[in-house]
Amino acid sequence: MSHLQSTSGESFPLHSLNWRGTDGSLLNILPASSFDPADIKPSSPASLWRYRTAMALPEEVEAVSFQEGFTPLIPIMWAGKEVHLKMDYLFPSGSYKDRGATVLMSWAKHLGVNDVVQDSSGNAGAAIANYATLAGIRARIFVPASTSPAKLVQLKAFGAEINLIPGSREDTAKAAVKAAEGNFYASHVWHPMFFEGTKTFAYEICEQLGWSAPDTVVLPAGNGTLLIGAFLGFQELKQAGVIDRLPKLVGIQAASCSPLFKSFHGYSKGSTSGTMAEGIAIAEPRRGGQMIEIVKQSGGTFLAVEEEEIKESLLAMCLKGYFIEPTSAAVVAGLSQYIRQHAEADEKIVSVLTGNGLKSSDKIQKILSH
Ligand SMILES: *Cc1c(COP(=O)(O)O)cnc(C)c1O
């Protein structure tokens, strides 16, 4: 039976409502699960729930699910090279955050929770609110007062209680933490059960490649909910002997807000400013240390992309028929940079479209009219 363990060695039962250690440290779920591809039966759903036995969920937990995931892995020519793109902008709420939300909200429902608290700059809140609706759980979502009205519509439509907090993203997080006292904090950053969902990203890629690993995976690096999840998944598959090596993980940041890129390469911290890639505009990622460790261990790197590169990638992807949001385009811009500066001729590269353009059509409109 797995348990929660803090980075400073404290341990809690899996069922506890703790989302951090008593000293404020991060929690992870231990031990790592073991998975056998033979666990997938002909009757297994064509969704991320086909990897159910790899999730740290007790057997009796019922899935709160739209049968999401198992998104297509499509080969395209990009920057002169064939790469595979994972279509994670096709999830019910419009971003890959649903991977974590379906598992975390299944767990919350199993625990008998009636009420969850979450904070977000948009997509994680939408995902939690979406699955809360399905589970019959009330969602209280904290967002910065500056959040664009378009992003609030989705939350409103799902019947979430919206709390607009003046000040920075950090102030919003503080308000949520306060409200989370004695409640279930459905945080995509803090709650380790969220990563039990995002790790299916790695399982899907390996199955779609005939149970083999790509050489390199190019991912967003905001709070690391996908990057950390992907690493956990690849690591478990390696330990199970399903794949023989870990892919290099390449984390993409926006140059104007790139604390991990700077720290990884030894540049001075400097200041951060705004970026159109709002989903990765995280000045102080809570799991930053973990992200740097993971990228190092995988033999990968962090890259930073300029606003102009993000715009170009957005327009180029849209002209190929992929309607993605600017944050998602930042990853594609990083993919171009990686291919041009680092890729080997026979390197097998996978990247991801993380978020749907319908979420920020106002921003895309502005880019088009320039
Ligand atoms: C949350 C989000 C990201 C950033 O992801 P992290 O996993 O937190 O680093 C990237 N793209 C989209 C569309 C997102 O919603």
Image (tube, rainbow, N blue to C red):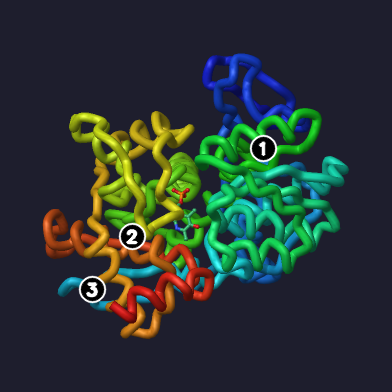
Q: Residue furthest front?
A: 166
Q: Identify the residue under disc 1.
A: 176
The disc labelled 3 sits on which kind of residue? Trp
- Seen from the viewer's position, the closer of residues 114 and 338 is 114
Residue shown at 80% from the left, 29% from the top: 182
- Mark 2 is surrounded, within 10 Å at the Cα level, by few (under 14), some (14 to 19) or many (20 or more) other residues, namely many
Distance, label 1 to label 2, CA atoms, is 28 Å
Q: Position of residue 42 (x, y in %)?
A: 66, 70
Q: Earlier in the sequence, mark 3 or mark 1?
A: 3
Q: Position of residue 264 (x, y in %)?
A: 25, 34
Q: Mark 3 vs mark 2: give the one in front.
A: 2
Residue shown at 65% from the left, 16% from the top: 22
The disc labelled 1 sits on which kind of residue? Ala
Q: Which mark is residue 78?
A: 3
CB at disc 2 and ligand 1 closer than 8 Å: yes
- Mark 1 is surrounded, within 10 Å at the Cα level, by few (under 14), some (14 to 19) or many (20 or more) other residues, namely many
Q: Which mark is residue 349?
A: none
Residue 249 appearing in the image: no
Of the 4 image quadrants, the one containing the C terminus is bottom left
Q: Identify the residue under disc 2.
A: 331
- Mark 3 is surrounded, within 10 Å at the Cα level, by few (under 14), some (14 to 19) or many (20 or more) other residues, namely some
- Seen from the viewer's position, the closer of residues 298 and 276 is 276
Residue shown at 24% from the left, 55% from the top: 305
